[in-house]
Image: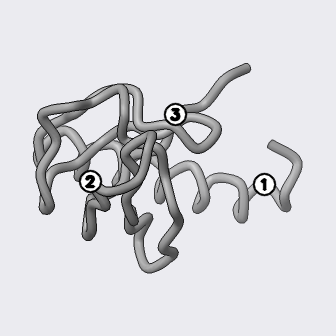
Amino acid sequence: MCLGVPGKVIEINYESSPVMGKVDFGGIKREVCLEYVPDVKVGDYVIVHVGFAISKLNEEEAQSVFRYLEEMDKLTEQLGGDL
């Protein structure tokens, strides 16, 4: 199963090749390749898969995914981690 995770672009380095940037995943910041989303701007949300931003999404969609992931985490805790 492949999983793309939403994050907020907080920095873009146009000097690097490929274009790289920092993305905030709920407090965890990682360097991500932004080459596949050339129109991305600081403040945009992107879906990241294995270190590559593969698409943009709006803030409402990103918040919806964050809520879903929180619910999954709560469910896992209730089931004792057997999910």
Q: Which amino acid type corresponds to the residue marked 2 in the rendered image?
A: Tyr
Q: Position of residue 9 (x, y in %)?
A: 27, 59
Q: Position of residue 48 (x, y in %)?
A: 47, 40
Q: Which amino acid type corresponds to the residue marked 1 in the rendered image?
A: Leu
The quadrant holding residue 60 is top left
Using the image as rendered, state which of residue 67 and residue 35 is in the foreground. 35
Residue 37 vertical placement versus 70 (above, below): above
The quadrant holding residue 73 is bottom right
Instruction: Point out the frontmost of discs 3 and 2.
Output: 2
Using the image as rendered, state which of residue 58 and residue 53 is in the foreground. 53
Lower position in the chain sequence, tag 1 or tag 3: 3
Residue 79 has which mark? 1
Residue drawn at (37%, 59%) of the image: 21
Asked if labels 2 and 1 touch by Cβ distance under 8 angstroms, the answer is no
Residue drawn at (44%, 64%) of the image: 25
Mark 2 lies on a secondary structure that is loop
Q: CA distance from mark 1 to mark 3?
A: 24 Å
- Local packing at callout 1 (Cα closer than 10 Å; few below 14, some 14-19, many 20+) is few
Q: Position of residue 16 (x, y in %)?
A: 41, 53
Residue 61 has which mark? none
Instruction: Point out the frontmost of discs 1 and 2.
Output: 2
Mark 3 lies on a secondary structure that is loop
Q: CA distance from mark 1 to mark 2?
A: 45 Å
Q: Is residue 22 left or right of residue 3?
A: left
Instruction: Point out the frontmost of discs 1 and 3.
Output: 3
Lower position in the chain sequence, tag 3 or tag 2: 3
Q: Position of residue 63 (x, y in %)?
A: 23, 52
Residue 4 has which mark? 3
Q: Which amino acid type corresponds to the residue marked 3 in the rendered image?
A: Gly
Asked if labels 2 and 3 touch by Cβ distance under 8 angstroms, the answer is no
Residue drawn at (84%, 57%) of the image: 81
Residue under label 2, please give it. 14
